Amino acid sequence: MLKIYNSLTKEIETFKPIISGQVKLYSCGPTVYERAHIGNLASFIYVDTLRRTLETSGYKVKHVMNITDIDDKTIAASKAIYPELPPTEALSKLTKKYEKIFLSDLEAVGIDTDKISFVRATENIESMQTLILKLLDKGFAYQAADGIYFSINKYRKADKKYGQLVELSVDQTHIARINNDEYDKDEASDFVLWKAQKDHEPAWDFKLPDGQNLIGRPGWHIECSAMSEKYLHIPFDIHTGGIDLKFPHHENEIAQSTALGSDRLSNIFFHNEHMLVNEQKMSKSLGNYYHLADITKKGTDPLAFRLLVLQSHYQKPSNFNWEALEAASNRLKSYRAFADIRHQPLLEINIVSANKNEGFEQTYEGMSSGLVREASENLDTPSLFAFLDSYISRVESTGYNQKYFQKFLKTIDDLLGLDLSNRPDISSTQKQFMNEREDARKNNDWSKADELRKKLSSEGVEINDTPAGSIWYRP
C-alpha cells in the first residue's frame, strides 16, 4: 500500500488511483536550451523511482513528460547561438540538440525512456490555443496590447482558490501583469497565456473569435495544462516536479486547468527538494554548477550518481560533492560484487541435501517484500538501502540459492534501477584461471597464485579469498 506526501493537502496520504489498477502520471520535463544540470537529473531520478514503486506494487502506469521547446529561454539561446538562421529553424536546431542529450543522460542514470511518453510543446500549439479560447470565452482570460493574460481576480470571484500549493499575498485592488515565463514574486499576478510576436521570434497564427489573427507563441504555463489534459485528461493521479516549480508554474497550471470546471488538475502533487552542492545552491557564478558530463569525464559510472541521489529522501535537500560521489561509487561496486556471487557455486547451498528450500524461499520473499515496503512508505529510499545492506550481510554469511537470489536481484533493479540482475558471468578462460589459482593456493604455490590474480585483475576480475574459498567480483 503506497503512501505518499501530497503537496496539495500537506499530508502523507494512502494512494488511491482514480481508476483501479491504473496510474496517470505527468512530469514537468526539461527546457531544452542547455544540458540539464545534476539537480534536474536528481528530480527525474526520484520520479523514475516513484514510477518503479508503482509498477512493482502492481499498477499499470501511463507516464507523460513534456519537453519545453518554446519559451523565453529557448528563444534567447537559439538567437544567441544561431543568429544567422530563421527563428523557427534556429529554435528547432537548438532544442533537438539538447533534447537528444537529455534523453541520453536519462538513460545513463538508469531511467528507461521507453516507459515515458515525451510530448513537445511545439507539436501541441493547437491544444494550447483551444484552451486559451475557452478561457477567453468564460472571462478567465483577457487580451492586452502584448498578448492574452489569465485573470486572477476572475478566478477568485468564481470561488476558486489561487494559492493551493503555496501561501500567496493577494492584493484584490491591484494585480499586476507578468509577461515573463518565470518570476520569483510570491504574490498573485495575472500571467501571460499567449505572447504577441516580437521581432525575430518564432510565431504561430492564432485566430481569435473577433477575426483577429494574434500571431505569437504560448506562455510557458499554458503548455503543461494543455498537454496534460490532452494526453491524460483531468483530473489525473499524480503530477511531479522539483520544489522550485510549485510557484508560479504549478500554481498557474492549477488555475488554468480548474477555471473551466474540474476542482483538481491532479489528485496528488509530488515535489522533490533541491540538490545542493557542498551545502550551497547550485550557481554558475559559484562554479558549482555541474552536468552529468562532469561526472562521467572523471570516469565515474552515472549509476553511482543515481545511488547518491536515492541515498537522500526526496523531501529533504540532497547534497552533492565529489567525496560523497566517490562513496556512492564504492557502495555501487559493493552491490555489484554482491550481485556477482549468483554465478559462483561456491556460495550456493545444496538445498536438496540440506533440505532448506522452504527456508530460502521465505527468506528471499521476505527480503523482496521488505524492499517494496520501504519504498511504499513515502518513497523512503534511505531506509530501503539500510534494509538492503542488512540482508546483504546475511546472504554473504549464510550462502544463497540461485533461483531465489536472482528474483531478489530483480526486485532490487525493479525498484532502484541499479542494473544488478543482468550482470554476465566471467568467461570460461577466466574460470579456468580461477581453478588454477585455487590449485596453486592448495599447493602453497603463492607465486603462481599471485600471477593468476594479477592476470585476472588486468581483465577486470578481482578476487576475495574467504574461508569458503575464492570469490571473484568486478568493480
Image (cartoon, rainbow, N blue to C red):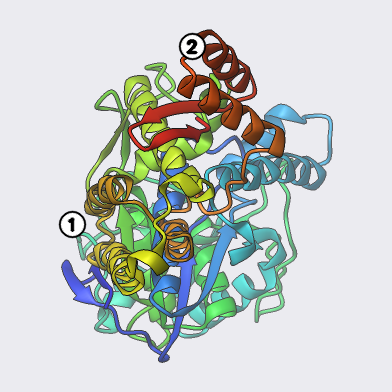
* Left or right for 209, reference 264: right
Label 2: element kind: helix
Residue at 38% over, 45% down: 183
Residue at 71% over, 64% down: 123
Q: In the figure, 254 relative to 310: above or below?
A: below
* Crowd band around label 2 with a 10 angstrom C-alpha radius: few (<14), some (14–19), many (20+): few
**Outermost residue toward the bottom?**
20
Residue at 55% over, 22% down: 299
Q: In the figure, 425 relative to 162: above or below?
A: above
Residue at 32% over, 74% down: 358
When asked about the image quadrant of residue 172, the answer is: bottom left
Q: Check disc 1 and give the amino acid type.
A: Ser
* Left or right for 144, reference 466: right
| Closer-to-camera residue (124/199) | 124
Q: Is residue 60 visible?
A: yes
Q: Report x, y in % for residue 24.
A: 47, 77
Q: Is residue 180 visible?
A: no
| Residue position marked by numbered label 1 in the rendering | 169
* Residue 258: numbered disc: none
| Residue position marked by numbered label 2 in the rendering | 446
Q: In the figure, 203 relative to 360: above or below?
A: above
Sequence-first tag of 1 and 2: 1
Q: Report x, y in % for residue 372.
A: 32, 67
